[in-house]
Image (cartoon, rainbow, N blue to C red):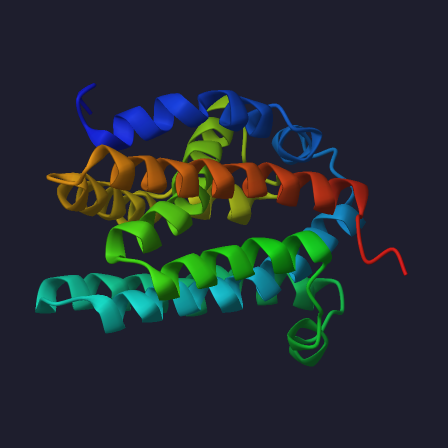
Amino acid sequence: MTKDRFTSQLHERVLPVWEHIHRHPFVQGIKDGSLPMERFMFYMKQDYVFLKDYAKLFALGVVKAEDTETIKWFSSLLHETLHTEMDLHRGYCKEIGIGEEELENEKATPINLAYTRYMLTASQQGSLAELVSCLLPCMWSYHEIGTMLKKEVKNLDGHPYQPWIEMYASEEFGSLSHWLKEKLDEWAEGKTNQELEGLQNHFLTTSRFEFMFWDMVYYGHEWPV
């Protein structure tokens, strides 16, 4: 990735936020296996709720796309989210007695709701570039986290969070975020400075929401009343 690419500039701008995410006790607890399973299950249930709305962003991508290849890619992203990623959540939950009905009935916390509504509103009202700038921090940072953890964990065999780490570190998952980065670089070409600043603000805002989500599931922040 060269420095003149728009996504390189985005990554550099949010690096302090992402470094906080990488050092977050939730992520570090996944790495060393010390994260309490009850915290992880709260995360899995809230992330399942999140993914249902996240999938709608890819459906919006299909609607907004103007060429067949882009439609296919957004369709693949939608399928990956609804099946591979959400299947992982269903599998973990089933292991400890949380059924699919309970998972489906889980309600979003305030941070979860604010995050998804921000993305959906901006994406519905904006362009494909705006849509991708909103949803990309989640996929991109997760692949970074998965890759980092797979590299740093000396032996994944028997690790309590092995399937989670391996899925987000996988080349298949990485290829999807790589495609999104390439498309955002393409769609950013020729845009005005004001338009580019708008994309950067979406990217920064949703990166901040990513940190808040990790913080929320680690400390158990729910509705206060």
Q: Residue at x 34, y 71 (%)?
A: 59
Looking at the picture, does residue 2 appear above or below residue 143? Answer: above
Q: Residue at x 72, y 46 (%)?
A: 217
Q: Which residue is the extreme one toward the right?
A: 225
Quadrant showing the N terminus: top left
Q: Nearer the viewer, residue 8 or 73?
A: 8
Tell me how many marks there are: 0
x%, y% of residue 43? 68, 52
The answer to whether residue 45 is seen in the rendering is yes
Q: Residue at x 70, y 38 (%)?
A: 215
x%, y% of residue 36? 78, 42
Q: Nearer the viewer, residue 51 or 39?
A: 51
Q: Nearer the viewer, residue 120 or 170?
A: 120
Give the side of residue 191 with respect to residue 125, left or right.
left
Q: Residue at x 87, y 55 (%)?
A: 224
The answer to whether residue 157 is seen in the rendering is no
Give the side of residue 27 with respect to residue 34, left or right.
left
Quadrant showing the C terminus: bottom right
x%, y% of residue 198? 35, 41
x%, y% of residue 17? 53, 26
Looking at the picture, does residue 148 appear above or below residue 95? Answer: above
Q: Quadrant of residue 182?
A: top left
Q: Nearer the viewer, residue 35 or 68?
A: 68
